[in-house]
Amino acid sequence: MAAVPDLPLWAWNLIIAVQGHEDQHASKDQCLKGVLNAIPTEVLSQAEAISAYIQKAQGNDLADKAASVWSDLMAGFFPKPADEPEATP
């Protein structure tokens, strides 16, 4: 397998954006398919891996935020008495 080039961040972002556009609109319009075909396979694979990692990280952030909001909501409905210590995770 060929080495993945050291591209600047803007280049990776551009490639990922083009891939995302094609993923979202592939059934209707494949106007950027030629652009993707011009990008080396190794670069496309690395861009897909980067995109998947970012999506997973964003999903984890969303889950953490949801848990925090739920916890705050429950604390508002069921406050702990002043003499009861809070449980530590």
Image: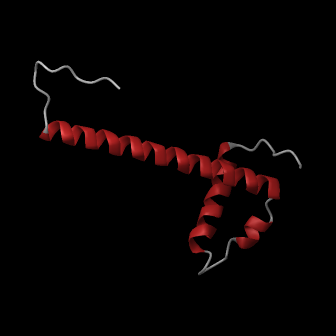
Residue at the far bottom: name it: 28
Q: Quadrant of residue 48?
A: bottom right
Q: Which quarter of the rendered picture does the C terminus lie within? A: top left
Of 88 and 11, nearer the camera is 88
Of 67 and 61, nearer the camera is 67
Q: Residue at x 74, y 57 (%)?
A: 44
- The answer to whether residue 56 is left or right of residue 76 is right
- The answer to whether residue 89 is left or right of residue 38 is left
Q: Residue 39 appears at what percent x and percent y?
A: 79, 60
Q: Residue at x 56, y 70 (%)?
A: 24
Residue 54 seen in this snapshot: yes
Count all numbered tags in the image, as a single digit: 0
Q: Residue at x 54, y 51 (%)?
A: 55
The colour scheme used to paint the residues is: secondary structure
Q: Residue 47 appears at what percent x and percent y?
A: 69, 52
Q: Quadrant of residue 84?
A: top left
Q: Residue at x 41, y 45 (%)?
A: 63
Q: Residue 38 appears at what percent x and percent y?
A: 80, 64
Residue 40 seen in this snapshot: no
- The answer to whether residue 8 is left or right of residue 75 is right
